[in-house]
Image: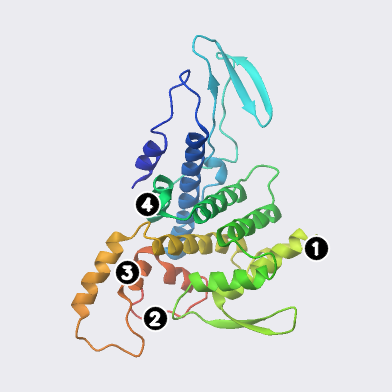
Amino acid sequence: MNPAELHLKATASVQLPGATAHTAAERLNLVRAVGVLSFSTITHAWVVRIAHQNDVPVPSGDSFQLIFQRFRRGSNFVGVEAGRTMHGWPLEEVMFTRPWAASSVFGGPDRYLVEALGNLLLGPTGFTADFVERVWRSLEWFRLAHLDGADQTDEAKLVAVATSFESLFDLPMSGKQVEFAKRVEGLVRDPDMGRDTRIRRSGKTLDLSLAGCWAWDFYELRSRLVHGDAIPSTAFNAASGTPHLVIADLVMRECILRELFQYGCFGSDIRQAAVKLNQHLAGIPQGPEPFDAVEFWLDWHLRFSRLHRALGWSTPQTGSP
């Protein structure tokens, strides 16, 4: 599914102006389609910048705003809504301007994310209602975290991104930091990833992958922010110097892709390639760790391990994608 197909299918049931009003379901589908395009385009730009070292611009969430406008047939007036306020203007006097923070979009969205999330949008009955709602809530918080208006701050963005993760993972009321680190470790995985430790408030040592350590540090920063601690600007970067917000985008991308791949939302071509590769390798002795053809092709297409290496989480291996 390409972005045009996603847009056409999401808007297929929307009525022409002056006919019947949009139903709540129609409006919701449009909002979610915009969330798909926002998430898949922003994260894809970071993949290109970090995995491929191509300095493409990363769009802001302001570039993906959906405007519902009321028109009445035969009337020369339009009702312009802004928040809770509506203004009536003659059509020849009103002008809709592009927000200053709305950056240009280069390169387009990640086709695998569009396919996966598009299938979730168009066929939600194949999944539990709780899972579907968690994904969409997560993407809406992600979009809000990437608005670049004059009132937006890195502090607010980081808390919004953390809330996006909380929505996706449905974290418990207590022990969120530990659970968050473990959920990230379970999804952002790599056989070559290093490990380190973190100290819990109880004094116990927690052994984690480096992705899990990042998640621990990220949630610690989030907790300090929401409790009003003064945070130096340097704390918004990981030890490698990469901003936590950038790493969070890449981690969220991998978490959602792996979750949706497990549900079969995308990747039929990847699974078919894995079957052919297993047939080709049949009878060839393997090493101590069994070869996973599905994981090999998933990583090849989605560049997970390349991103892990770029972030300093794993050791380069000869022949890795």
Q: Report the amino acid beneath label 2.
A: Gln
Write the residue at 68% across / 54% down: 154
Left or right: 97 as drawn, with respect to 173 = left
Of residues 73 and 53, the one nearer the viewer is: 73
* Label 2 SS: loop
Left or right: 91 as drawn, with respect to 299 = right
- Neighbourhood count class around disc 3 (C-alpha, 10 Å): few under 14, some 14–19, many 20 upward: many
What distance separates the C-alpha of mark 2 from that of mark 4?
30 Å
Sequence order check, earlier mark of 2 and 4: 4
What distance separates the C-alpha of mark 1 from that of mark 2?
41 Å
Residue position marked by numbered label 4 in the rendering = 115
Q: Residue 298, percent across and down?
A: 36, 67
Numbered mark located on residue 229 in the image? 1
Image quadrant where residue 263 sits? bottom left
Image quadrant where residue 79 sits? top right
Write the residue at 70% across / 66% down: 221
Left or right: 70 as drawn, with respect to 270 = right
Q: Is residue 112 visible?
A: yes
Q: Residue 219, percent across and down?
A: 66, 66
